[in-house]
Amino acid sequence: MIAIGIDPGKSGALAVMYLDEDRSIIRIKLVPFEEQAYRDALLCCKDDKVVCVVEKVSAMSGQGVVSMFNFGRNLGMIEGMLMALNIPYQLVPPKTWKKEFSLSSDKQTSIDVCKRLFPNISLLATPRSRKESDGLAEALLIAEYARRRM
């Protein structure tokens, strides 16, 4: 079985949890946002039993038109890939999945909780990164939400 969590934001990411029959985690794969990398990661999941949660996001006041257009394009691309690969998914608002982990809107809190739950997982987007990625952390937490709730 596989649990997938997707944070569709600009600095978003995709997390894939490979699970055994008891839903215990066997392996975790984190993928920073990049169209081809997402496609490759999702292709590996298409024939397995999959639960997938995509963060259901909406426009926030103060965001520019261009950034909102790009954001909508990213979300549409992700949903299109999931549909093309016949991977069922559910859109879950941030408020819902964050409640599972008692998170606020502070991105550092997501990183801290993720490190506590998954201490052996690197949240660096690349080997050269110095700062941990809140996108990777939130994608992994969304996958954990899917594993627990779906």
Image (cartoon, helix red, strand yellow):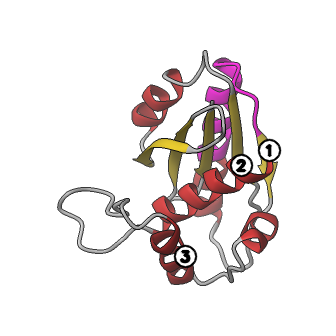
Q: Which residue is mark 2?
A: 146
**Residue 148 at x, y percent in the picture:** 73, 52
Q: Which quadrant of the structure image shows residue 120?
A: bottom left
Question: Residue 86: within the magenta?
Answer: yes
Residue type (three-letter) at the residue carrying disc 3: Val
C-alpha separation, residue under disc 2 versus residue under disc 3? 16 Å
- Which residue: 55% across, 82% down? 109
Say if 81 sits above or below 28 in the image: above
Quickly name the residue at label 3: 113
* Rendered residue at 75%/36% (across/down): 89
Spot occupied by residue 61 in the image (x, y as percentages of width and height): 74, 78
Residue underneath mark 1: 150
Who comes first in sequence, dot 3 or dot 1? 3
Q: Position of residue 118 (x, y in %)?
A: 46, 63
Give above or below for 139 relative to 109. above
Q: Secondary structure at mark 2?
A: helix
The N terminus lies in quadrant: top right
